[in-house]
Structures are given as C-alpha cells and as structure tokens.
Image (spheres, rainbow, N blue to C red):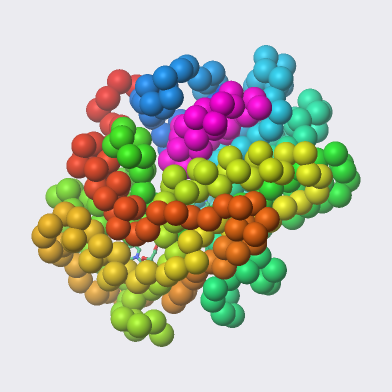
Amino acid sequence: MRVLVTGGAGYIGLHASLELLGAGHEVVILDNLVNSKREALGRLETLAGQSVSFYEGDVRDRALLDRVFTDHKVDAVMHFAGLKAVGESTQRPLEYYDVNVNGSWTLVSAMVHHQVHCIVFSSSATVYGNPHEVPIREDFPLSATNPYGRTKLVVEEMLRDVAAAYPELSVVLLRYFNPGGAHKSGLIGEDPNGIPNNLIPFIAQVAVGKRDQLAVFGDDYDTPDGTGVRDYIHVLDLAEGHVVALERLHHERGVHVYNLGTGRGYSVLQVLKAFEAVVGRPLKYRVVDRRPGDIGECWADPAKATESLGWSAKRGIGEMVEDVWRWQSQNPDGFSGLSD
Ligand code: NAD
Ligand code: UFG
C-alpha cells in the first residue's frame, strides 16, 4: 500500500514509517517540523535503506493536501500530526483545536474528495478521562479532563459521523497508552523540545546528566507504592500495531477502535528502578505535590486487539528502558545540532 503519514517526522510517526517500509509499503510523509527535525527523516531513510517522499507543510493546508493526493495515489492515511502537551493545551486551547481538530477536518475532507478510503488515527487513553476501574476496555465511558483530551474526543466523534455518512470509509481509532522506547539502532527516538513533560524522557535526561533530579508527582495515590501507575508500551510494539491494524482493516468499512497497551501497569518508582538497573547507578529524585489533572492508575485491557488483530505488545519495561538509554546516551541532544 501507499500510505500518507502525517506527522511522520515525529516520535511515533518515524517508528511507524520504518515499520511500514519494512513491511513493503510505500510511505509519503507530511510534517511541518514544528516538533521534529529534518535530520530524523535522514535517519529514517538510512535505517530503511530507501528514500521517502517528504512534504514540509501543514496538515491544515488544503492546497498542499490536494497536491499530495494528486502526486501520489494514496491508499490509506496514518494521521499522527498534532500537538500533544496536556499542560500547554490548557494555556493555548485555540491552537490545540486548530491543529488537532481543524487539521483532522481538513485532512479528512481532502481524503473524501480524493477518494482515499482508510484513516488510522492516533487517539489516546486520555479519552477515558478518570476511569472507574482498571484495566480499561474500549467500551468504557469516554470523557476528557483537558483541552488536549477533548480534541482527541472531538476527532473520534467527527470520524464516526464521517464514517456513517461515507460507508466506503474504514476508520481505525488507536488509543495509545504511554508510549516509550526507541529503535534498537539508537538512531531514532523521542526528542522532546525543552523540558520533557513525560516520565520516560525526563528520567532519561536525568540519567544523561541534563537534569538534576526527577520530581515524582505525588506518592499518596491509592497504588502499591503511592506513585502513579501507567501502561508503558514500547514504540516498536505500537508501530507494529499500526501496520497490523492497517493491513487487517483497510478494506473493513466502518469504525474500529482498539486500545494499544500492554495490559500491565508500572509505578513511577518502578520505572525509575528499571532505569537505575540499566544505567547502573542510583538516580536522584524527590517527591513533590501531585500534578493537577493526573489520575492514580491507568492501564489497558488489550484483549480486543489480541483477539481480532492477533497483535499484542511483546516488549517489557526493561527492554524499553534499555532502548531509551541507548538512544539518549548516543544522542544526548536528540537530533539537535545536526544538519537541519
Ligand atoms: P510528536 O510531536 O513527536 O509528533 C507529531 C508530529 O506532528 C511532529 O513531527 C510535528 O512536527 C507534526 N505536526 C504537528 N503539527 C502539525 C501540523 N499542523 N501539520 C503538520 N505536521 C504537524 O508526537 P508523537 O508522540 O509522535 O505523537 C503522535 C500522535 O500520537 C499525536 O497525535 C499524539 O497526540 C498522539 N499520542 C501520543 C502519545 C504520546 O504519549 N506520545 C500518547 C497518545 C497519543
Ligand atoms: N510523572 C512524574 N514526574 C514527571 C513526569 C511524570 O512523577 O516528571 C508521573 C505522572 O504523575 C504519572 C506518570 O509519571 O503518574 C506518567 O506521566 P506522563 O506525563 O509520562 O504520562 P501521562 O500518563 O500523564 O500522559 C500520557 C500522555 C498523554 C496521554 C496519556 C494517556 O502525555 O498525552 O499518557 O495515554 F493522553
């Protein structure tokens, strides 16, 4: 298949593009590089051993999308492009609605016009809000606790409406839990701008000496050690999940929803310990107040994806942390400072 990957220069899009190329698909990337670097695409091409068509531009730019869909007979779209920082979304909600909602609307409008019939959308476990129990199944009630989460919910709903009106469409909503890890080569990985919001890149920067210590956001949750518990899924498992979902579902009309998680939760302190084991020394941390909006525990019931797609996450937390450490120690400044 020929797949348009929006946001393909970003963390998950890069790994999914590599997996697509490895499975024999053709990839066209559209990304405005607002949260990624051109160098990442060079590394993708090195790893894939082939070149990739790249359009530098905005997913909200309809004329550009028309050009992409005219230049390439695209069979399906994987839509990763978007803004993803929860805290920032509360400060800049209009920007989040514009990029995430208007961007998806523009993309899907162009797809309908150009008769592209399959979209795989990056949704998030954030659409479950504060779940009444764990593990979380796809049929749990949906809600949002911040503007970022609401943009994901709105796009999910919009895609359902569009699928109902255009029955030839296949819409795949993949709800990721907490992605982490990096490619085994150490050539591509997560390269957050500024201070990382997320646990894994933050600990990686403490380990490499870029940050002094980890602030643990609360140790008074109702969890075994009091710190927050999440379902950390290796980005390579996530990438494989995308390709399997695409291959199995691109001709299956309607809306298909899957959790992509491991089904296991780890606490903040357990993740820290896993890093210490790989790095071979203790890492500094201190406990601070809870982060507003955080929930105590969140992990997936991934049974639906296993039963109907035959997919399950294969990699554990130790492997994830080893891969993050290889990437971080080989690239302490991420893709920065390299040719752009
Ligand atoms: P990322 O920021 O690394 O990648 C997103 C890419 O989209 C970046 O390369 C960025 O430059 C590009 N982009 C942003 N706005 C754009 C625009 N207007 N036009 C074109 N390109 C644009 O993020 P990621 O972690 O790879 O996340 C990918 C998707 O997965 C996002 O939609 C995100 O919301 C979703 N998601 C991520 C997580 C996570 O924890 N990483 C969890 C759940 C869902
Ligand atoms: N945490 C810390 N210190 C930090 C960062 C995080 O203690 O410096 C804790 C959090 O309190 C939480 C856990 O580590 O208990 C994980 O936090 P992350 O910020 O890494 O991840 P979240 O679960 O808060 O959110 C992530 C993404 C969201 C997505 C959500 C569900 O950032 O976009 O997973 O998929 F919606």
Q: Which contiguous range is marked in magenta?
A: 1-26
In this rendering, position of residue 110 left or right of residue 178: right
Residue 98: x and y, percent?
62, 43
Residue 11 within the segment the image draws in magenta: yes
Residue 66: percent from the left, percent from the top?
Answer: 71, 21
Q: Residue furthest top?
A: 71
Vertical position of residue 92 compared to residue 184: above or below: below
Closest to the observer, 46 or 129: 46
Residue 313 painted magenta: no
Q: Which residue lies furthest to the left in this view?
A: 281
Q: Is 97 situated left or right of 185 in this image?
A: right
Q: Please say if 111 is above or below 147.
A: above
The residue sitting at 18% across, 61% down in the picture is 276
Q: Residue 190 location, x and y as percent?
A: 36, 43
Please tell me which residue is depicted at 38% across the width and 73% down the height of the picture: 228
Q: Residue at x 27, y 41 (%)?
A: 327
Q: Is residue 64 visible?
A: yes
Q: How many labels does the image show?
A: 0
Image position of 232 with respect to 336: above or below: below
Specify the quadrant that holds the N terminus. Answer: top right
Query: Residue 3 location, x and y as percent?
Result: 63, 29
Residue 134: image quadrant is bottom right
Q: Return the residue nearer the eye: 290 or 334.
A: 334
Residue 305: quadrant of the picture: bottom right
Where is the C terminus found, in terms of image quarters?
top left
Residue drawn at x 72%, y 53% is 256
Residue 150 seen:
no
